[in-house]
Amino acid sequence: MPVFFTFISFLLLCPAASAQTIIPGIDRVEMLKTTSDEKIIVAGIAGRGKKADFAVVRLNRDLTVDRTFGRDGVVRVDAGGKEYLYGLAIRPDGKIIIAGFTRKGKKAAASLASDFALARLNPHGELDLNFGTNGLVITDIGARDEIHFIATTPSGGATGDGSIVSAGFTEENDDSDFIIARYRPNGLPDATFGKNGIVRIDETRDDRLYGVALGSERRIIATGSVHNKASGKEECIVIALTAGGRRDKTFGNSGMARVGALREQNICSSVVVQPDGRIVVAGFARRAAGDTDFLIARLRPNGKPDRTFGSDGIQFVDFKNGIDAVHALAIDTRGRLVAAGDVRLAGDSQSQGDSRRSGTGFIALARLLPNGRLDSQFGREGKATMFFGGHSGGEVTSMTLIGTQKIVGGQAGTKGMIAVLRRRADDGKPDGHAEIGVEPLGNRAGISRRETTEVGKAVLPAHQLGDDL
């Protein structure tokens, strides 16, 4: 059955499109999650410069704003400085945890100085005063401290205590170390984990974590990069810690595995643990200046390559001759891997970046079968690309799945955006093209919604995107 795209775009729309309601806005979408009742939590940043705050919006499944949440559907959290959000988790009780870092106080004078920052919201959007101090937790480790992902254990059961695991890095004097911090459900450091709730690992002069997931028995799996002395570039790694914060000696080489991509540079930013314990990481691999591919690799529970996946445990996906990078990874209900990222064409003056934000151009999706091969039933031989809300220059940061729908979030230019890929209605007619627009009004924003029947916003025509999403 043909598919089409729905876009939710935080951008300026013509006021005549529909009536407007005054609510706070989001300027950049960073994270997406789905609740147990299939509502969509959108988290990102509101405001710019020193006034940037955490921001959370809740959408109903039909993509309308859930106005029972926060203030007319939106919550804005000020952690005391300039905030950057990279972590989002939803507890079984509906409470929402957001995380990232904040730059403030004396550290504001240094361009990159920051502290870990976490906040917890009640299901209706109020700050949870039983978490940290007035709903906030700030952790100062070094000069520059950044959280780039979080994971939570469910409450109850043999291994679930509701704790929060954050992964990132700390940097001083141009030397960065891995940081994994674990917090108790009330936001206090977990004293049973590492040293005062923090594990710090120094492997090379440039160690950074960008993703974390939890395995069985509260095992912690994190991915990121280290500095490879031979190439002088970053190299994708996976580390495993026990529940107590010790390096898992049964995994890789003393708790760390290097993903042998055999390329000039490779960085992994996403990780998922399959039900059978196998570990999938994704990011990008550079083959030459200005040319990278999606990198998706699978490891066995002991950290060795899973040679039943792709080619010797690795699958590269090349969309175009340019920067292709994965920023989000998920497993669907049929065990297939969905990787979302972006593509920037070769020759673009901005396509030389090396970070996980390296590509900004088209949305790119790839779906892999459990054996790592591209799924020919998806898109064009397993791959699909599209403009972001009708704009070239899109940057993907996150993804969540609801049934057969794939929802990706990110930014196009200065506009935070969401794109929803789904099937047509049962009658074969498109449901239409929906947009939500925000017009900044000082510290507030006007929001409007309009419906059209436009579906041709894709690089691939809609009918070429596959019958089976």
Image: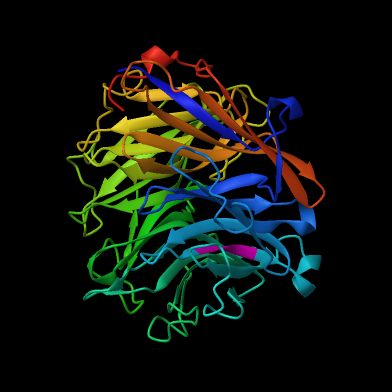
**What kind of secondary structure does the magenta stretch mostly adopt?**
strand
- Residue 238: percent from left, percent from top: 36, 57
Picture quadrant where residue 159 is located? bottom left
In the displayed structure, would residue 315 be above or below residue 281? above
Q: Position of residue 310 (x, y in %)?
A: 24, 35
Q: Nearer the viewer, residue 277 or 91?
A: 91
Specify the quadrant of the image occupied by residue 350.
top right
Q: Is residue 100 magenta?
A: yes
Extreme residue in the front direction? 19
As for residue 445 lying within the magenta part, the answer is no
Left or right of residue 4, residue 395 in this image? right
Q: How is the image coloured?
A: rainbow
Q: Is residue 130 left or right of residue 423?
A: right
Residues in magenta, as a range: 97-101
Depth order, front residue of 256/434? 434
Q: Residue at x 39, y 81 (%)?
A: 193
Q: Residue at x 52, y 47 (%)?
A: 233
Which quadrant would the N terminus be assigned to in this image? Answer: top left
Choose between 114 and 87: the one closer to the eye: 87
Query: Residue 211: which quarter of the image?
Result: bottom left
From the image, which quarter does the C terminus lie in?
top left
Q: Is residue 255 visible?
A: yes
* Residue at left offset 23%, top offset 33%: 369
Q: Is residue 411 above or below residue 198?
A: above
Query: How far across and down, in percent of the image, does residue 111 sit?
Result: 76, 60
Picture coordinates of residue 332, whole percent (x, y): 28, 41
Residue 101 placement, left or right of 185 = right
- The reply to whether residue 359 is visible in this rendering is no
Instruction: Count every numbered label the image shows and give the total.
Output: 0
